[in-house]
Image (cartoon, rainbow, N blue to C red):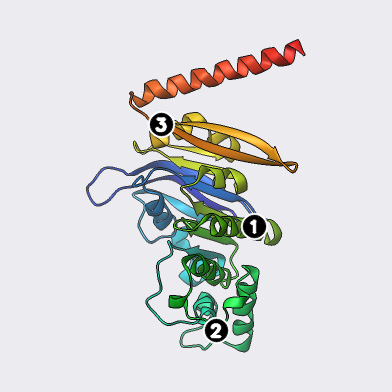
Amino acid sequence: MIFEVKDASFGYKKGPDILKNLSFSVKEGEILSILGSNGVGKTTLLKCTLGFLPWRAGSTYINGKPWHEWKNQEIWKKIGYVPQAKRSAFSYTTEEMVLLGRNAHLGILAQPTKKDYRFAEECLDMVGMSRLRGKLCNEISGGELQMVLIARALATDPELLILDEPESNLDFKNQLIVINTIHKLCRERGISSIVNTHYPEHALAISDKALILNRDGSNSFGNANEVISEENLCRAFDVDVRIRDFMIEEKRHVCVLPIDVLSRDISEQVTVVEGRNRFRERRRTSLHSRE
């Protein structure tokens, strides 16, 4: 699947555009991370791409075909959506929750078949949560519920998985479980993924592409290693940051360290960061030439 948004903008009623001139694409097996400060419109963006809110301009495309030309059932056979996790108010078992993901494959008033039940159990296995079979969703932890919701999205048998802040409110271990599961599913099963996240390190660890939303409505899209830079993070979050990478057991890891909240004009601070990085690059080049 090729999932695209072209020349899209969004604003509420008669208000100004919150999202402006957005264009991005995700191809088969790729992971796109969306970053931006609180209130910048990350969740709104996902709702627009999925047709829950109407674009003011532009459109969403699936395999080159505009969203409105697809039937809903066709769309939800291709896309699995995981909203921000909230405690379940209903006493569904984990299997029943995951089974809800089969709805797009069932006819009106149709009942799940034995095949649907088996597939739901397989989806729990895929995310490493088979031990939760028979447990109630309102009695498991937040991290466990998040994995169950991912399993529910996988029960759609999607080509694209869209997740809204899947690792929020989780401890270190469960954050790693969630992002590692997303990465594994995409790499091993060829599923594409779009992930809203507050963690630049996670985006750099698993993403092929990145989209950063700024408060003025502008955005940056492209290769994750290029887009997630000190300059762009400085501009998006109004925070001076440092990005450092290091090797552990022959594997590259990246650390994004927030230094301080900006106290000067943002454009001035970005200029300082750009100048610092140019100096660092010249120094690195100079040292290599001496060697």
The residue labelled by disc 3 is 260
Residue type at mark 1 is Cys
SS at badge 1: helix
- Whole-Å distance between the Cαs marked 2 and 3? 47 Å
Residue at (55% x, 33% y) in the render: 243
- Above or below 235: residue 116: below
View extreme (left): residue: 14
Q: Residues within 10 Å of mark 3 (few under 14, many from 20)?
A: few
- Above or below 6: residue 162: below
The foreground one among 166 and 218 is 166
Pointer 1 or 2: first along the chain: 2
Count of residue discs: 3
Q: Residues within 10 Å of mark 2 (few under 14, many from 20)?
A: few
**Mark 1 and 2 residues: CB-CB less than 8 Å, in contact?**
no
- Whole-Å distance between the Cαs marked 1 and 3? 35 Å
Residue at (37% x, 76% y) in the render: 89
Q: Which mark is residue 272?
A: none
SS at badge 3: strand
Q: Which mark is residue 186?
A: 1
Residue 98 visible, this orientation: yes
State which quarter of the image contains the C terminus. top right
- Disc number lying in front (1 or 2): 2
Residue 35, position as x, y percentages in the image: 46, 44
